[in-house]
Amino acid sequence: MSSVLDQRSAPPSALPSRVPSRRRTRVLALPEARWALASLVLFLIALPLDLLGAPAWTWGPLFAAAYITGGWEPGWEGLKALKDKTLDVDLLMVVAALGAAAIGQVLDGALLIVIFATSGALEAVATARTADSVRGLLDLAPSTATRLLPEGGEETVAAEDLKVGDTILVRPGERVGADGQVLAGESEVDQATITGEPLPVAKQTGDEVFAGTVNGTGALRVRVERDPSDSVIARIVKMVEEASETKAPTQLFIEKIEQRYSIGMVIATLAVFAIPLAFGSDLQSALLRAMTFMIVASPCAVVLSTMPPLLSAIANAGRHGVLAKSAVVMERLGQIDTVALDKTGTLTEGTPRVTDLRPLPEAGLTEEALLALAAAAEHPSEHPLARAVVDAARERSLSLSEAADFTSAPGQGVSATIDGHTIQVGSPARLQPAAGPVQAVVQELEDAGQTAVLVLRDSAPVGVIGIADRLRPDAAATVAALTELTGRAPVLLTGDNERAAKHLADQVGITDVRACLLPQDKVTAVRQWESEGRKVLVVGDGVNDAPALAAAHSGIAMGKAGSDLALETADAVVVRDELATIPTVVALSRAARRLVMQNLVIAGIFIAALVAWDLIGTLPLPLGVAGHEGSTVIVGLNGLRLLREAAWKNPVHAGTT
């Protein structure tokens, strides 16, 4: 971690407020990707020459080069693995490809090489991107902080050198350098990266602040309460890494299967070659039978049993705005039985909007006049609530008066002179203790999950404006569809306050609400469900959701407003922010899994029949190749059924025969 921190030199103000900078590894910077690309290009050049009957000297060297560029690395790694008495399937595929070439099936062998080289490259790219995203998260925390000296004065120090008990100064617009407690000052802090709250939170003496969050317009003196290595941001990084590693046992299981298959194939091939020789068969006949066995027993049809359905589902989902990052992701999405949804930016749009205008009767203002008055005063402000008020006025094409003598008080609101009147807009609790009708209106709006903004004219209340993060129009339908798919209603996991969370949950039909959660709390909930045997899908959009996305069986990020880390950590991304696509892609995944099972049965029948024919009788090589390639074509075409538009519209029946 320290080596990554040492690379950060940008001052806090140079960093974006919510999105970590990305230092992506370029795809072609990876050797696996370069070798796979070279092998694919050579194969595609040689293929038409071979199929059109061109002389062997035109396509032979190209196929040979494809074998070398695509097969040397897995072959070399396989040979090194033999030193540890391990035989992996990559080496087996290289041997099978060479065996196919030895009996004239050069094209089959080259295709096998290209498939496995491409698979290895994709795995390397995914690994590199995950590492990049975790490193990028560290950019949320500033590299330096201003430490106040006991004898007076200040000094700039590396953030990682701060100690518990130090006092730091956080100026307006800077990122907080460490987790701590406010000793003096008032401000509003944007802590969406940690809690997911859509609006800045007012901070004053005694309140807790987190490293990496962005200070507003006030200055804060903060006492460091946690070592930088134990800050919330640092723990998020650690949780993402640990959660990613929990998926390793599945990979280990696959490797065990590959190992057993590899050993079985080698033993069987040697037996098919050696036994006839022992009983007097000539060398050429024994070699031909053994090579035929290697061809018909090769797992091409088994490989294609899995990939076409899943890749077709990926392509279909991609056309409709859902990016699944791999075939493994698409397969896993169909296994989920529990769904956890974030609130802000997931079930809601993530942008505060004016939802209610309540002019007081005694003020004599219309709704438009109240909005115009507030928008004129808020116009110079950069606060998200101010932008919501101004945007609402623009949407109604209201004419705004010029504001004079503008002032802004963190956590309180703004004040300006409009047409000779002093207009104040801000928190009801800070501007004026609400009573009577004003208190009733404020209470009503807050009970409905809205933020109440009081408008004063010459110190007298004239109206209240309700602002809320708008619910996505397809949120309720999505919750209902996920409930039907999994057999249980989704759970709401949010860092927002409990009242706002419960109000939204009631609107969409969610009964299990977990509010005021930090990132580690979301991970705890996910791991609790996983320990009960559930397969959890987490849907979120922010940095604070990333650990839960990584810890879950599957994770989906909302792409439009999603943070870089959430997008990289999630298994799939809803690019167009259409929430209703989530249950559809889950159903499409289940259809793909059904097709995979169908294909495996078909491939197994073909392989078993051809192998039995070769062992019991005399399987002609051309017939063996035709049977092998025929089974490959059948399972491939069966899998491509999910490319149809009907598979997206009705995925429940797409995988049935």
Image (cartoon, rainbow, N blue to C red):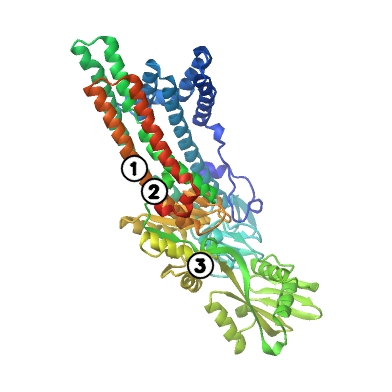
The percent position of residue 40, horizontal first and vertical second, equals 51, 27
Q: Which mark is residue 337?
A: none
In the displayed structure image, the side of residue 165 where residue 453 appears, left or right: right
Query: CB under 8 Å between callouts 1 and 3?
Result: no
Q: Nearer the viewer, residue 618 or 65?
A: 618
Instruction: Rate crowding at label 2 as few (under 14), some (14 to 19) or many (20 or more) other CA atoms within 10 Å.
Output: many
Q: Earlier in the sequence, mark 1 or mark 3?
A: 3
CB within 8 Å, label 1 to label 2 = yes
Residue density around tag 1, few if under 14, some if 14–19, many if 20 or more, within 10 Å: many
Mark linked to residue 655: 2
Gap between marks 1 and 3 measured at Cα: 45 Å
Which residue shows up at 40% across the image and 54% down it? 652
On residue 598, the disc is 1
Kindly tell me whether residue 150 is visible in this rendering.
Answer: no
Image vertical order of residue 419 relative to residue 70, above or below? below
Image x and y of residue 302, in percent = 35, 35
Indicate the amino acid at tag 1. Gln
For label 3, the residue is 496
Which of 583/505 is in front?
Answer: 583
Question: Percent from the top left, x then y, of residue 535?
Answer: 36, 54
Q: Is residue 363 left or right of residue 224?
A: right
At 75% across and 75% down in the image, what residue appears? 416
Residue under the point 57% across and 68% down: 470
